[in-house]
Amino acid sequence: MNEQSPAPELWSTIDALYEWLDTNRPVEGREGLLLRILKLSEEVGEVSEAVIGATGQNPRKGVTHTWEDVEAELCDVVITALVALRTLTPEAREVLARHLERVTRRSTAHSAQADVPRHSL
C-alpha cells in the first residue's frame, strides 16, 4: 500500500486553526496561552464522557455514545494538543518530530532489550 503522509496537510490545517484562534482570541498574553493549553483537559474529559456513554457505565443514562464518538473526541484531543503546541512555538512540526523520534527510539530500544535472552550463571 502506497499511502501518502498526511503531515503537510495536517500542519497547514493546524497553522490555519492556530491563526484563526489567534485572530479571535478573547484573552491575550500568558493567560490566553494557559487557557489554550487548559482546553486539553476539557477535550480529555469529553473522551471520558464518550467512553462512559459508549459502554453504558451510567445506569441512569445507559448507552449514550458510540465508539465513533470516542474516535471523534480523541481526534479533538490530538488537534487541540497540536494547536497548543503551535501556540507555544512556530516550530511545532519539528518539535513533535524530534520528540516522536526520541520516544520511538526509547520504546523500541526497551523492546529490543526485552528480546535479548538472559543467561543465568
Image (spheres, rainbow, N blue to C red):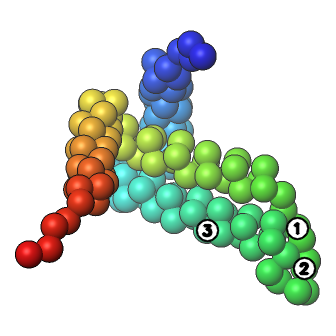
Residue 104 vs 51, above or below: the answer is: above
Residue 104 vs 67, above or below: the answer is: above
- Is residue 47 toward the left or the right of residue 96 in the image? right
Give how far apart the Cα atoms at labels 1 and 3 are: 15 Å
Picture quarter containing residue 38? bottom left
Going by the numbered disc 2, the residue's amino acid type is Lys
Look at mark 1 in the image and give the residue it sits on.
64
Mark 3 nearby-residue class (10 Å; few <14, some 14–19, many ≥20): some
Element type where label 2 sits in the image: loop
Residue at the image position 53 percent from the left and 42 percent from the top: 79
Q: Where in the figure is residue 73, as x and y percent of width and height?
A: 67, 53
Circle 1/circle 2 CB separation < 8 Å: yes
The one of 2 and 45 positioned closer to us in this rendering: 2
Give how far apart the Cα atoms at labels 1 and 2 are: 7 Å
Element type where label 3 sits in the image: helix
Residue at the image position 60 percent from the left and 16 percent from the top: 1
Q: Is residue 6 visible?
A: yes
The one of 38 and 45 positioned closer to us in this rendering: 45
The one of 92 and 53 positioned closer to us in this rendering: 53
Residue at the image position 46 percent from the left and 18 percent from the top: 8
Q: Where in the figure is residue 78, as x and y percent of width and height?
A: 52, 46
Res. 83 mark = none
Element type where label 1 sits in the image: loop
- Is residue 81 toward the left or the right of residue 48 in the image? left
Look at mark 2 in the image and give the residue it sits on.
61
Look at mark 3 in the image and give the residue it sits on.
45
Give how far apart the Cα atoms at labels 2 and 3 are: 17 Å
Instruction: Identify the mark nearer the N-term, 2 or 3.
Output: 3
Going by the numbered disc 1, the residue's amino acid type is Thr
